[in-house]
Amino acid sequence: MTTICSKSADGTIALGEALGSRLGPGDVVALFGELGSGKTTLAKGIARGAGVGEEVFSPSFTLIHEHRGRAPFYHVDLYRLTGAEDVEQLGLEEYLYGQGIVVIEWADRARSLLPAERIDIALDFAGDDRRAIQISGTSERMQKIVGLVVSDAGACN
């Protein structure tokens, strides 16, 4: 796991763009962090990097927003779900094992359903608009993508 420092919302979006530009069909990104930690901001950047031309907003009320990009882009927000049963009823597995790029906010609420191959990102407050962003890949391919993103962004010193 590597920690990247973002000094602003624009920096978090740029990090997301760098990641999104390297993702393809079937890739899953699981976002973890407290309310207001920057998950949606990062998701916006990932979407932009994945070729989504429209603005991406938190799908808190519809739970899943579908967008067009280089591949179908699914932005999932599990904040309002309270248990594993709610997540299972959502039909999330259909998206997780499909041909789109899936970004999940509040991924801890679906941990048992997450695919083995994915990128995990934990966002933490580091004061003001700064964030400490821990990123890791769970497979060799995902680790390679993470390595490229980290080399672009630079790790925290």
Image (tube, grey):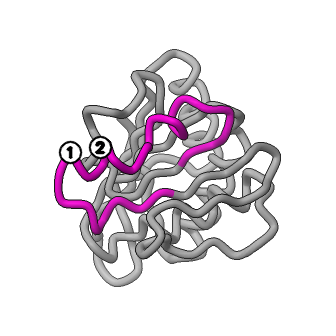
Say if mark 1 contacts mark 2, CB within 8 Å.
yes
- Front in this rendered view, residue 30 or 88: 88
Where is residue 76? Give x, y as percent: 47, 57
- Side of 108 relative to 54 (left or right): left
Toward which corner of the image does residue 99 lie, by quadrant?
A: top right
Q: Residue at x 76, y 72 (%)?
A: 54
Of marks 1 and 2, which one's residue comes earlier in the chain? Answer: 1
Write down the region rendered in magenta: 76-102
What's under tag 1, amino acid-wise?
Ala
For residue 38, which numbered disc appears in the image? none
- Front in this rendered view, residue 113 or 123: 113
Q: Which residue is mark 1?
A: 84
Q: Which residue is mark 2?
A: 110
Quick one: SS at disc 2?
helix
Q: Residue at x 58, y 24 (%)?
A: 144
Q: Is residue 28 magenta?
A: no
Q: Depth-wise, is mark 1 or mark 2 nearer the camera?
A: 1
Q: Residue at x 57, y 75 (%)?
A: 57
Q: Does residue 157 appear anywhere in the picture?
A: no
Residue closest to the far top: 140
Where is residue 112? Give x, y as percent: 26, 32
Q: Residue at x 74, y 51 (%)?
A: 50
Where is residue 111? Give x, y as percent: 27, 38
Query: Considering only vertical position in the picture, is 70 above or below 117?
Result: below
Q: Is residue 78 magenta?
A: yes
- Side of 3 relative to 109 (left or right): right
Where is residue 73? Give x, y as percent: 67, 51
- Side of 141 relative to 137 (left or right): right
Toward which corner of the image does residue 67 lie, by quadrant?
A: bottom right
- Side of 10 relative to 79 (left or right): right
